[in-house]
Amino acid sequence: MAQFSFNASSAPQPSAPQRGPLPPGSYEVIIAQSDIKATKAGTGEYIELEMQIVDGEYTGRRIWERLNVNNPNKQAEDIAKAALGALCMAVGVDDLTDTEQLHDIPFVIGVEIDRKDPTRNRVMSYGQAAAPAPKPAPAKPAAPAGARPWAR
């Protein structure tokens, strides 16, 4: 048995989880989970993406997107396929054969408040994450004082 002394009344109170939509803006995210599901009507399929913010004030928050990739409404299908194409380009996947190919690759989404439901967000765009800044080359050791630069 391990002995440990702890008084729960002096422990810090956990902060309440953040609720509600994210403010409009750009967020760096990864796809944490994905699935292909049948539509409610059973006449098509959509890809459901669960994205997690990986940078900034809202790190850890999640946002979901549904892309109607197989739908009797041609316009809905075209919109979804255009969004999926932009997403694939953002993460560098040319030939998608499994939605897991999109997982864990940082990219940026543009988010707005959904005009039909102001309690939700709407993903408006997909883009590449900024490349990390290149690391500076290591400095060459300084020659000893009084030494000639060509002398080793």
Image (cartoon, rainbow, N blue to C red):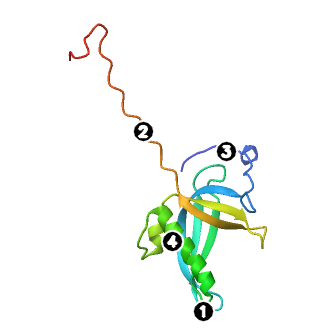
Where 133 falls versus 143 (above or below)? below
- Look at label 4 and name its amino acid: Gly
Say whether residue 147 is left or right of residue 110.
left
- Look at label 3 and name its amino acid: Phe
Count of numbered badges drawn on the protein: 4
Q: Residues within 10 Å of mark 1 (few under 14, many from 20)?
A: few
Q: Nearer the viewer, mark 4 or mark 1?
A: 4
- Look at label 1 and name its amino acid: Thr
According to the picture, the residue beneath numbered tag 4 turns out to be 85
Where 28 falls versus 79 (above or below)? above
Where 76 falls versus 83 (above or below)? below
User: Horizontal and vertical percent for residue 117?
Assistant: 78, 72
Q: Is residue 47 visible?
A: no
Q: Earlier in the sequence, mark 1 or mark 2?
A: 1
Q: Residue at x 62, y 71 (%)?
A: 65
According to the picture, the residue beneath numbered tag 1 turns out to be 43
Q: Residue at x 46, y 71 (%)?
A: 100
Structural distance between the alpha carbons of marks 2 and 3: 45 Å
